[in-house]
Every structure is written in C-alpha cells, then in structure tokens.
Amino acid sequence: MAALSMTWSCSPLTSSKFRRVNRYSGMAFASVKSTEGLGNLPKVILTSPHGSEAELYLFGACVTSWKVDSKDLLFVRPDAVFNGQKPISGGIPHCFPQFGPGPIQQHGFGRNMNWSLVSSENVEEKPIVTLELKDGPYSRAMWDYSFHALYKITLDKKTLSTELTVKNTDNKPFSFTTALHTYFRASVTGASVSGLKGCKTLNKVPDPTNPVDGKEERDVVTFPGFVDSVYLDAPNELQLDNGLGDKISIKNTNWSDAVLWNPHLTMEQSYKDFVCVENAKIGKVQLEPEQSWTAVQHLTVS
C-alpha cells in the first residue's frame, strides 16, 4: 500500500473555532499528518495543541503510541514486526470478529488487514481521524459476510478516545466477538487495576480452552505472575495504576467485559514493562442486516 501524503492542520486563519496556542515561543495547532512508519507502512500522527500526540498504523488500525507530556503511555513489544504480514504486537490492536481462539485465526482478521483513512477533522482543538474496514477476499475466506467497520480516534489534552462501529451490510445475520487488546506501558511489579471487585471471572491460566469460573474478591488486582483473566459484566470505568507514577482512567460505553493479561516468563524479554487491560465483548454481538453496533473507549491520564 502506498503511503498517504495528506497533511492537515487548522489555525485561526481557517476557522474561528480553532484557537492558536503558543508553546515554547512557537506555534502549535491540532494536526493530522500521514507519513511512512516502520517497514514503510502508512502511519498517521495526531498532534494536539496541548502537546499530546498519538500515532496509528493503517495496517490493523493499530494505535501504537499515545504521548502526554512526552511520556508514552502505550507499549509496543520489542518483538513486534512491521511487515504488513503479521499483526503489530503492542499499542491497541483490534480483535475482530473473534476474540481469542476459535474457528478463524487467533483474535480474528481486523488486526491483520489494511484499513483506509476516510476522514480527518478538528473539533474544539481535538484532532480526529476515522478509519474504515470492509470485507474482501482475505476476510471472506475465513468469515463469509459483508460488513462495514468504522473506527474513530480522537486526541485531547490528556485523553485518547476510540469509537468502533460495526455494521452488517450483508443480506443475512451474523455474530461476532471483539476487543481492544490495549498494551499499557507499566512496571509489572507495581501495576494494579481497581474497579473489578464483585465481577464474575473466567481464569484462563490453568487451561485457556476451559476457563475456571470465579468471582473477584480483591479491591485492587495486581500482576504477580502469569495473568489471563476475563471479567464479565465489568463496570464502565476502571482505574489503572501503571506503577510508573501514572493513573489512567479506562472508561467505556458498550464494552461489557474486561480482560487482564500479562504473559510473565513466557515473554521474558518484555513482560516486566507492560500490562494489558482490555475492553472486550466476550458474548456474541448478533446483527441483522443493516443493523449496527457501537462501542466507545476513553483513556484519560492524571
């Protein structure tokens, strides 16, 4: 896929809605820039006038970086490849239309296809881009349905928001499961998640194919070893302490479940440097023709 050459920005000269901001004796504007990333893959950079920045690859619609005050809050694994053949391991990969193992490839094909950049805009100094994915020969070989997915990413001063909409454009119903497999930069020995107490749990550590039912009794969940747990009917806000001095609020609408994961010694090279806290839809979403499903995530650092 050829890299996009579009560069977009807004200033007071183009719209009264957009305010010019002085930073370090220079000028800073909300902007969206398309460029080449690693492996010559098309990449989009969102910049806020407040100094925050996000980067995403069109391959997999994967957000690979979210910086606030020059600190990257996301993590990309050192073994990640950027060749357009394998999913990017890190950031915020998509799991669609299947979360985990199942009849098609692990975590589905959404993270292993090229998405298209369909629009960019600036709303109240927030750069916004929207990507889309449609079915094609690659997806239909695994999952023979016509669909249209839109993924909107919005960057604010201290918040990164995503909105995923999936529409059934086929003439027959289909169902899917999905998740945002978010890798947060962390010190695994100091990281913790609060807000999950009382949730029904599915512990996949003993046997991933036969999870053990349970109930979360802890106020604060930590990562003392290998962790792979699903939390059903999770609350719409969790709090992550990344062990590096940052508190991150993870709010959502319509992501009904949550997943915590850290591979521990099975990924000895990097497990100490990240934790995954994932918004997910473990139960199947059933869509009739022309029906849509939308889920929103807001990550805010304090």
Image (spheres, rainbow, N blue to C red):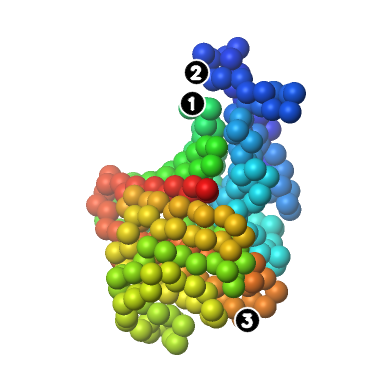
Residue 155: x, y in percent?
53, 39
Closer to the chain start, of discs 1 and 3, is 1
Front residue of 73 and 246 = 246
Callout 1: few (<14), some (14-19), or many (20+) C-alpha neighbours within 10 Å?
A: few
Disc number at residue 17?
2
Give the Cα distance between marks 1 and 3: 45 Å
Residue ranking furthest to the left: 288
| Residue to which mark 3 is pinned | 265
**How many residues crowd mark 3 within 10 Å: few (<14), some (14–19), many (20+)?**
few
Secondary structure at badge 1 equals: loop
Mark 1 near mark 2, Cβ–Cβ under 8 Å?
yes
Give the SS element for disc 3: helix
- Could you tell me which secondary element the residue under label 2 belongs to? loop
- Report x, y in % for residue 186: 60, 63
Q: Which residue is mark 1?
A: 124
Visible in this render: residue 157?
Answer: yes
User: Does 214 appear above or below 196?
Assistant: below
